[in-house]
Structures are given as structure tokens and as C-alpha cells.
Amino acid sequence: MHLFFTNQRLVGQWPPPTGPSADVVRDLLEHRSIPDGMPLFLDEDMRPVAPVCHWFRAMAYERRDPETMRKYAYIVRRVDGFLTKRETGLLGATEADLVAYRRSRTELQEEPVDGATWDTEAVVINLLYTFLVDQGYLRRKPLRVRRGRPSSLGSGMVREMQVRHMTVEQYLYLRDVGFGGQLPGAEIDETFRGHTPHRGKAGLEFALLTGARKQEWSTLLMPEVGEGWRQPGESLEIELQECAKYKLARKLYVPAAAVEALEMYFLLERAETVAKAARTLARQAAELFIVDRVDAERGKLYGVHEGVRRTYTMSAMSPALRRITVREGEAGLEPLAVFVGQGGKLLGPNSWDRLRGDAWLRMRAHAEHHEAPPLPRKRWRFHDARHTYALQLLKYLMRLMSERDVDRARAGGLPTTAEHMAFNPLLVVQRRLGHKRLSSTYTYLRYLEDPMNYVDDAFREWSEHDGATYADIALRALSLDGTAA
């Protein structure tokens, strides 16, 4: 099968010598409500492969994220290629064929995939065959499913949320040395060649002080962070929905310190980046959403998109739409996104990961400096700032609740159910993080204290050996051996 992805903007740019015209294709996509980014599998005659195309169209109608469908499509193509070599195909595969595919991915290929990667593929395979059975393409799945026991495709691994958090010293080192390009002693590094250190620092600061996920804070628009309506020194709240995980609507609280970090970036770097990108954006004007009015109070943007007058609610705008949202400025078109790249568009996830990789290399280069804190084996992620936020907030709220309970006990009272719900630290942190399940928030409880410290304290007397070090003990043993000889 050949894999393609739909993109209506490309229709008509390279018309085929035969076949339907660009207008016919465009009308067909519109009639079928085919969104951009939907995977399309074609056979050798360039005709859609019905079962797989139907599955992806069903996911597209469910508004599944295009990046998620792209990942699924590559997995399906890989599975189909393996099954084609075994002369079975997706509809003729048996459990033995799928187990053989699992073994080829996890054991036989040059670089076997880990358990987490394989489990993702197993989930996709199971979802595909569930759809094929539901739609009548197959009578039953080729996989045996036994209640209470793992599937024959599962890795058998049981994983929990990976929580890594930073100390203050590690965070400042990441912010100032990694992204800011300073030296560990806070001196200026004259060899630093980064173009936008304040952008990286502002993004990291925003992630830490809000606890937002990367897709939530990196896709923000200028009106959402208070442009035109926020007074200096004020905090703010942002309505999240489309860019939030599972699209769960919630309010993101942003303290004044996080906004001040953004304002420093606006003042020192963003304006210059925006001015340089005006000419590039002007050439792409037909593909952009050009805003001519902002209603910050109602959270709406008014403008022209694809030649049609549109009104969008900011919280309901997807990352793809935010990426092409611009407005007329003094120097021409300028992006409405907070974090922008050299081309004038919203900085994407891959660009942020590249900046993070560069920051890690700078941190490693100065890791031997006496003022550098210990570094983990794996590079820090932006998500680790979210974990740090969660742990610090949970520690503070638990200490505050303990103090309140002591004061109430002295007064001879007990907390009401309403007070318990309103001030319960776990419930507060769950709401702030936007966790769908409270069990995800419970995971942080085991990271409030480092159990290794307790192990050291518990066995310190056992390991002192009357104050002698292991080197002293070894020298004494050698001396006794020599005397005996």
C-alpha cells in the first residue's frame, strides 16, 4: 500500500494529465467532509484500500488529532508490509502472523523496540481489528482475548507515570545555562551563539509556574496572555480546551511572574523576530488566517481565512489553526502566536525539542564546573517542569492543610465535607494539572520525600564500623596479614 495524507491546499497545483479536474477533487473532498491530515492508503492502481481508509475516515470524523493519525498510519503501513511478505495481508492475518510481527519488532530487527513502543503498536493493531470486526470485514479478531489475561500481543510490562522533578539549583541551571547561554557562575558566555535565549527561558518559566503541558503553553496567542487588557503586575487565567489533553476544558492560572518572563522575551527578542518574518508571511497570505479584530473579553478573533470571513473562539482553535493566525502590524503581517520561529509562525514541537537538545549539550559541557548541580542520566524534558510544579504545589498545600487542621483542633472543631473538597491538596492539584483521573495525581504522593535519604539514615550506624572507613579497614587487614606472615 502507498501512504498519502490529504491536503486541500495542494489540489490543483499539479493537475494530472488525465482523470478528474482539481475542481472535481476539491468538491469531492468537501462533500465527503475529508479534513486535512487524514491518512489515505492506495493500492498499486492508486485506488483507496477500503478497510484501512474507512478506519482513518472514521477517526477523522471523530476529530482525532492529525499527528496521532499520522503515527497510526505508519504503524499500519509497517504491519501491512510485513503481512504482505508472509502472503496474508491485513484481512487474512492469523494470530501466528501477528505474533511473528511482534517478534520481528521486539527481538529480530537490528535495533529492537522497547516495551513501551511495542505496546503502542499493539494498541493500534487491536483498534484496527476491532473496527474491521465491527464493520463486518472480519467475523472475529485474529487475536485471542481472554478475560483477566494479557493479549498475545502485549509486552506484559506494567508501567506508571514517569515522574522526574528538579531541585531549585537544577532548574536555574537548566534555565540560565541551558537556555540562557550563561556560565554556571552567572557570567556571560561570550562563545554562546543562540539566537533567542529569552524565548527558551520564558517557555520554561511558563511551564514551571503554570504546570501546563507543552502543547498548552507553546500554542498560546498574544490576546490570551493579556495583550491589550492585562495591567502590569497582574496574574491571569486562560481558557483551555482544544489544545488541552483529551480536549478537557479548564482554566489555566498564570501567576504574574510567568507573564513577566514573557514580557522580557517580547521586549528583547520577539519584536525583532516578527519584523524579519513580515516578508515571508506576506508571500503566504492566501494560506493564513488574517485577524482584523480581537474581542479579548469574549475570547474571539475575527478575520479572513481561505477567502471567507470567519469568527473563531480562541479556546476552540487547534494548534494547526493557531500556527497560521496573523494580523496586520506596522511592518506588515505579524504572527499572533506568543512563541514564534524565524519564519514567523508558531514554534512547533520539533523545534522546541531541538532547542531543548541544544540546551542539554551546553549543560553537559559545563557539568564539571564546581557550581553546576548534579545532572540526571537522561536530558530534562519540558514535562519535568510540570512534574516539579505539581510536587511543589502538593507539598505546600499539604503543609497548609496540616496547619489548618492543627488550628481547628485547638479551637475544638472539625472540617466540613465542603471544606475537605475545596481544600483537599490532591483535588486542587488534580484541577490545576487537568488530570482526567485522580489516580494520576496520587502518583505524586510517593515522590514527596526521597526514600533513599531514609535508607541512608536507617543504616548509617551499621556502616560506620567504629568510625573507620573502608580504606582504614582494608589497610588494617593488610597489616595483620603481614604480621601473621
Image (cartoon, rainbow, N blue to C red):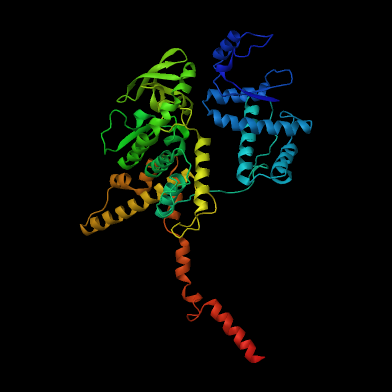
Quarter of the figure with the C terminus:
bottom right
> Quadrant of the image for the N terminus?
top right
**The quadrant where residue 241 appears:** top left
Q: Nearer the viewer, residue 298 or 439?
A: 298
Up-down relation of residue 466 to residue 239 (above or below): below
Q: Position of residue 300 (x, y in %)?
A: 35, 22
Judge whether residue 219 can be spotted in this image. Answer: yes
Residue 161 in view: no
Q: Is residue 476 left or right of residue 235?
A: right
Residue 320 as seen in the image, left or right of residue 152: left
Q: Residue furthest bottom?
A: 484
Total marks in image:
0
Dividing the picture into quarters, in which one does residue 13 lie?
top right
Q: Position of residue 298 (x, y in %)?
A: 31, 24
Q: Residue at x 32, y 45 (%)?
A: 421
Q: Residue at x 67, y 41 (%)?
A: 153
Say if 417 sits above or below 464 in the image. Answer: above
Q: Give the x, y percent position of residue 480.
A: 61, 88
Instruction: Give the residue at the far left of this rendering.
Output: 411
273 left or right, relative to 154: left
**Residue at the image point whose x is 60% and y is 39% from the top:** 120
Residue 138's x, y, as percent? 69, 27
Task: Say if 324 sits above or below 389 in the image.
Answer: above
Q: Nearer the viewer, residue 74 or 401?
A: 74
Q: Who is closer to the viewer here, 407 or 23?
A: 23
